[in-house]
Amino acid sequence: MTGTSLTAHSDVVIVGAGPSGAVAAGELIAAGISVTVLEQGDWVPADAFDGATPHWELTQLRKWHPNPNVRGRAEDYPIDTSHSDVNPLMFAGVGGAALIYGAHWMRFMPSDFRVKTLDGIADDWPFTYEDLEPFYAYVEEAMAVSGRDGNTAYPDGAPCPLPPLPIGKVGRKAAAGMNKLGWHWWPGSNAIPSRPYRSLQPCVLRSTCGTGCSDEAKATPDRTHWPQAIHQGVNLVTGARVCEIETDSPGRASGVVWIDGKGERHRHKADVVILCANGIGTPRLLLMSGLANRSGLVGRRLMMHPFAAVMGTFDDDLESWVGPAGQILTSMQFYETDKSRGFVRGAKWNCMPAGGPQSFRAGYGDGPLTDAWGTTLHERVRRKFGRSFEWGIVGEDLPDEVNRIALSDTQTDSSGLPAAEVHYTVSDNTRAMLDFHTARAVEAMEAAGAIETSVTSLIRDCGWHLMGTAVMGNDPETSVTNTEGRCHDVENLYIFDGSLFPTSSGMNPTATIMAVAAKCVLALIENRATVGTAA
Amino acid sequence: MTLSADQRMHLAEFAKVMIPGGADMPSAEDLMLWRDPIDEVLAIDPSRLEPMVRFLDLPGNIATLADVEALAQTDRAGFEALGIVLANAYFMHPQTRAAIGYPGQEARDSSGGLTPDDEALLKPVIARGPIYRSP
Ligand SMILES: Cc1cc2nc3c(=O)[nH]c(=O)nc-3n(C[C@H](O)[C@H](O)[C@H](O)COP(=O)(O)OP(=O)(O)OC[C@H]3O[C@@H](n4cnc5c(N)ncnc54)[C@H](O)[C@@H]3O)c2cc1C
Ligand code: SF4
């Protein structure tokens, strides 16, 4: 932990050192505003990750598992998921969950910002794709996005600063199937450089992005943002768990209280407090502080993108452990609403390598526990390993106030603070959507020549994308913040992470989280003189 | 906590039934999986030892997969730990990797980008034109 005095002060204090916190801190310090960032996790050096070791498949089941309940590290807070169909996933560290993200880089589609207008459900965003476009381009530059320009799913083709990664044998096989059906596909866009880029090494296709990149390639804020921000003067404190946002006059925050690894409490005073603790950490902190909840929506409208997958097995050797992972291809063929399908909105597909041999050890379904063993083990691995790939399906999750984060009465984190408790049910709309999409993905596999397909209709460990729990909007009765992330009830308290999202789209959200954070922080800097501060 | 001689013997019985070899892949016995390979796995992830040992201490002879199944139903978490340890010991072993042609998650050059063949595949997608819905 880099030190801070028992009562310290900066112009701004940010909670969380993930992608949204990194964007905010970088812009503020560049504008000459002093910033302290409090992060409960620590730095994770590239050589701590196991991707290049023979035991990569072992440690991804515990040490590098995306579910904090499975990892059980002191810096994680537990999450009670007994009332949830889906487990939220995240990582505590400098870089946040991006340390273990897949780096699938997707802008939302134009229609995602107009769901109410187009489909009569949920809400429109307070701005459009065109409004956000310059911010996408800005963060993509920092995040070394590799991809092929001209994607026909976007009005401007979603240009990328770096050329695409190879699509390999898997990509060619999947693309041929899609072409047979006349369906949209596009080479994957990833926050992974295909060339040496600034502080990043070129990707070596090791395919272990989801358990951390040991090759210093994947774009994560600990490489893309924090070194420069710290060099410019940001004070980033690790091992610092914020337990309360303090106020000292009605409607004004005065700073935060945080707890270090030894259990000691510290007070940090600031003129502005910004929460970048993700769609669960941010409402948890607001609920612990009893703030900004006139609308009753803090923690509500949780969206997590239920995920399904179709695996296809082929006769050919596809070397399907080779990356990136990362996404090799994407498809937006069935992204937009077609009400004749029996549900609204749609899903994005990503073509992924199948991974190492243990991906094929277990069978599917509720067969005997020993189904994965004996001669079956050998036959299954021989038949599938290296010859399989997956179409993953990210379904748009619509906001519902009953899906929510609460504070647990029974579980605490290592600092004695209440754990998060998740109440979340997969909706009928989502189930119908995933059924439709998995059926189409089976067709795509068969068109590509699959000799065998298997469908996983909903994966429980799929809460990668945490959104909606402190929604932005114009009306203080129906939203938590204004359209620039400023809390209606506490005028110098801001939220810049995925909690703000009115709807979730069917896209991986980090591009939009970072673009929205950039838009919001630039507005904060511009309006700085008018921001009220604690007395 | 370490494995006693009895527990290791019992582990060998499980390993032989669960990983019999076949499809040109080695058996647990070929690799003597219950010796160094298992110790290597437990050194990397010691959290698997306690539930696995609990499972190994269940009484019963192990001659067939049906015997394993019966015990597995009485302690699913213990069986899962045993499975993770055995599978990782097996697939981390160089002989198994050689047999299935798996070099591990190796490093390759990514600078080649899209080949002319890839671009040719993309042509019909481009020819069909935009697919987004204007709001
Ligand atoms: C396994 C996995 C794969 C993913 N793959 C993709 C992908 O391919 N593409 C994509 O777009 N997105 C992906 N995501 C999602 C992506 O990682 C997140 O959208 C992104 O990291 C969000 O950034 P953030 O800064 O808002 O939050 P986070 O990255 O979650 O960062 C929040 C930080 O706040 C800290 N924090 C929380 N509470 C406190 C507190 N009280 N005190 C101090 N610190 C606190 C946390 O420790 C954490 O470091 C994936 C996520 C996971 C888990
Ligand atoms: S595929 Fe590339 S970015 Fe991903 S882990 Fe491997 S080297 Fe890193």
Image (cartoon, rainbow, N blue to C red):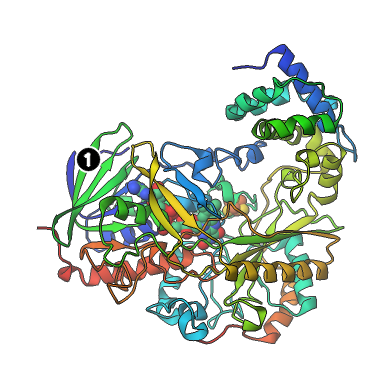
Between B22 and A468, the residue placed more toward the observer is A468
User: Which part of the image, by quadrant, shows the C terminus of chain A?
Assistant: bottom left
Inspect this view and state whether residue A48 appears: yes
Q: Which residue was labeled with disc 1? A: A266
Q: Quarter-wise, where is residue A243 in the image?
A: top left
Q: Horizontal and vertical percent for residue A39?
A: 35, 46
Q: Quarter-wise, where is residue A416 in the image?
A: top left
Q: Given the current orientation, which residue lies at the most extreme right position? A: B23
Q: Residue at x 84, y 66 (%)?
A: A449
User: Which part of the image, by quadrant, shows the N terminus of chain A?
Assistant: top left
Q: Residue at x 44, y 82 (%)?
A: A130
| Vertical arrangement, residue A209 with respect to residue B66, above or below | below
| Vertical arrangement, residue A108 with respect to residue A492, above or below | below
Pointer 1 local density, CA inside 10 Å: few below 14, some 14–19, many at least 20: many
Q: Residue at x 83, y 27 (%)?
A: B16
Q: Seen in the image, is A107 located left or right of residue A125?
A: right
Q: Seen in the image, is A179 located left or right of residue A477?
A: right
| Labels in figure, total | 1
Q: Given the current orientation, which residue lies at the most extreme left position? A: A535
Q: Horizontal and vertical percent for residue A190?
A: 57, 63
Inspect this view and state whether residue A198 appears: no
Q: Horizontal and vertical percent for residue A120?
A: 49, 83
| Vertical arrangement, residue A122 with respect to residue A407, above or below | below
Q: Quarter-wise, where is residue A19 in the image?
A: bottom left
Q: Seen in the image, is A164 located left or right of residue A313?
A: left
